[in-house]
Each structure stands twice: as structure tokens, then as C-alpha cells.
Image (spheres, rainbow, N blue to C red):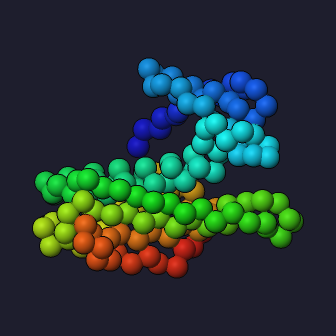
Amino acid sequence: MASSSIDVRLTQRQDYQFNVDFGSGVPPLLADEPAPLGQGQGPSPVQLLAAAVGNCLSDSLLFALRKFKQAPDPLSCEVHAEIGRNADGRLRVLGMQARLRLGVPAASLEHLDRVLSQFESFCTVTQSVGQGIPVSVEVLDADGVVVKPAHAPTAG
């Protein structure tokens, strides 16, 4: 398997505000810590981490369903990041819970059980983050029916 790399450049604007440059014509992003450190003018590092986990899970689920020519759109995802202190008293992300919602009823999708059993394993970000932070994933359909219950989060 070929390796690749991603480069992102952060440049301080002022205090805890950083311009995040993704290169390749992607619009830059302003990141900022919430008060009292920053001014909350952009997403915080924890929000960016939660967004990366949710985005990767959503992409992975969409890709897996589209491989079977299924249309689950529009997907949505909410990620809850629990922040607390570790044994050394340092603030850490202690765990994350992701809830994905399909845009259609589960009954309208073929091969859904197969997709739900494997889509997480293809999610680069969540699988990487999950080695250090417990991440649980739940999937609901458009009617709110739980089609994949959250498992007890584990970190590798």
C-alpha cells in the first residue's frame, strides 16, 4: 500500500487565533480557543478533532453505501467530545460519541447490515484517534430507529 502525507500550515494571527492553511486551493480557516484564553472566533482544536472524526465517519458510511448503489442522503452526524482531567490533572479529551443519521428509512437501503458491520474500520481518522481516545458510534435512520447501537467505547 502506498503512503501519502498531508501538510497543514498554521500561522498565528493574534493571541490564540491561528490561520489554518490547507493548501491546494482549499479556503483557509480561522481557529481560536474559547474564552478565557481566546475569543472563540473560530473552532477550537477539540472542535476540529470532533469535526474530523464525524466527517470521516460520515464519508466512510456514505462511501460504503454507495458501493452498493444505495442513496442514504442526506446524512448528518453529531459528535460529543467529553473533556476532563486525566490522572495528572491535565485537560484531555476523555472520550467521543458519534451519532450518524441516515437521510432515509433503513428499510429502503439494501445491504445495510453488511455496511454497518464494516464501515468504521475504513475510517482513517476515527481508527487513528480511537487508538488513544475511546470513540463510540451509533447510527440511526431517518425515522430515528437505531440501526447500529453504540458499543462501549474502547481505545487501543
Q: Residue at x 75, y 35 (%)?
A: 16
Decide which of 39, 58 is in the foreground and name it.
Answer: 39
Decide which of 80, 128 is in the foreground and name it.
Answer: 80
Residue 37 in the image: above or below residue 141: above
Q: How many marks?
A: 0
Residue 154 x, y percent position in the rendering: 57, 73
Residue 100 in the image: above or below residue 29: below
Q: Residue at x 23, y 53 (%)?
A: 73
Q: Is residue 21 visible?
A: yes
Residue 120: which quarter of the image? Answer: bottom left
Residue 30 x, y percent position in the rendering: 60, 31
Which image quarter holds the C terminus?
bottom right
In the visual, does 127 lie left or right of 117? Answer: right
Which image quarter holds the N terminus?
top left
Residue 62 x, y percent position in the rendering: 28, 53
Q: Residue at x 52, y 79 (%)?
A: 152
